[in-house]
Amino acid sequence: MTLIIKGTDLKIEDVVNVARHGEKVELDPQAVERINRCRSMLEKKIAAHEIMYGVNTGIGEFSEVVLNDDQVKDFQKYLIYNHAAGIGDPMPLEYVRGAMVGRINVHAHGNSGNRIEITRTLVEMLNKGVTPYVCQKGSVGACGDLAPMSQIALLMMGEGKAYYKGELMDGKEAMEKAGIPIPGLQARDGLATINGCNVLTAMSALFLYDANNWLKQAEIAASMSLEALKANLGPYRSKIHEIRGFKGAIRTAGAIRKMVAGGDLADGKLKHKVQDAYSMRSTPQVIGAAHDAIAWARSQVEIELNGVGDNPIFFPEDNLQLSGDKFQVSPSELPFDMAGSAINMVSVLS
């Protein structure tokens, strides 16, 4: 199958399929139109010498420095060199591929201002198996993945390193062997490749997918334990959880009932205590609360996957560019901290 990338409706499972299982991707034709329309607006603004952060100005402390025409051409290249400063061991390839599919989905909105060649190069890299070498450390905490994304952007200039067919090689060599033209970086292209928290979001998506499966395994293990301990199954009846109302607890209790159904314990053929140990009878509440936390984290991560975190952002329908701090990742970082606590809580229960 091929995943059609539209800028919307990208799910965690889609990221897993592309990042981990090599599913092919394709840009929706309307996304191509949006990218080209935005680029056309940007080029008109550049020609009119309209001041735009990160396009014809410096960044950070140099945002008030206006660049001349020659500097605009070189700025994107130096921007990538400046930020490609990660350290540590290589990042798992699935994280890098996940970040790339997330970045393509951002571009598909048509608000990033990059040339279509940049997005199509990312698509080809995913489909032909060219995965940039990216270091694990370098992100700015909960605020942007400029360092790791810059190691991806190096490939746009035929630089850096990349894996191809299981071998690590120079980026230019990997692109040539895969038959992918090197697009180079023009105005805005570099920043549009690195502007966001795509690595953190990809890591979150993969974690949440695995965490959901892990919670199902916790329910299986709990069911086996309850049968081995000849538990009182009263605490798992639906009424006791529906009257309180937490969706996760209702779900976990239902999963446990389904797994023990048909056994001697569920059929009342074995004796049990009036009330079991607290850890046993609180299993639906604990695992269920973890399900609720994971569900909230998933909702936030999928908003991030389908949103635009660039700075600046371009609105061609209004002939407008606005600058802010869109890649602040606190909206998904906070629920993700909770997700980690939830996994720890279920582990302690076990």
Image: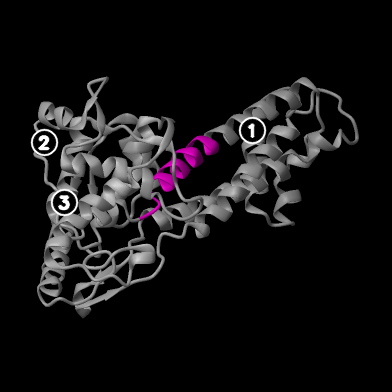
Element under disc 3: loop
Tell which circle, 3 or 1, labels the residue nearer the N-terminal end.
Answer: 3
- Relative image position of residue 332 (x, y in whole percent): 51, 55
- Relative image position of residue 86 (x, y in whole percent): 40, 39
The residue lying at 11 percent from left, 46 percent from top is 183
Residue identifier under label 2: 180
Identify which amino acid the numbered label 3 is placed on.
Leu
Classify mark 3: residues with Cα within 10 Å, few (<14), some (14-19) or many (20+): many
Q: For this view, does 253 lie left or right of residue 324?
A: right
- Relative image position of residue 132 (x, y in whole percent): 28, 34
- Relative image position of residue 77 (x, y in whole percent): 21, 50
Position of residue 133 relative to residue 48, above or below, is: above
Q: For this view, does 156 lie left or right of residue 272?
A: left
Q: For this view, does 275 lie left or right of residue 217?
A: right
Quarter of the view holding residue 176: top left
Residue identifier under label 1: 219
Residue 111 seen anywhere in this rendered image of the structure: yes
Identify which amino acid the numbered label 1 is placed on.
Glu
Nearest the viewer among 285 and 113 is: 113
Identify which amino acid the numbered label 2 is placed on.
Ile
The residue lying at 86 percent from left, 25 percent from top is 271
Frontmost of labels 3 and 1 is 3
The residue lying at 31 percent from left, 32 percent from top is 133
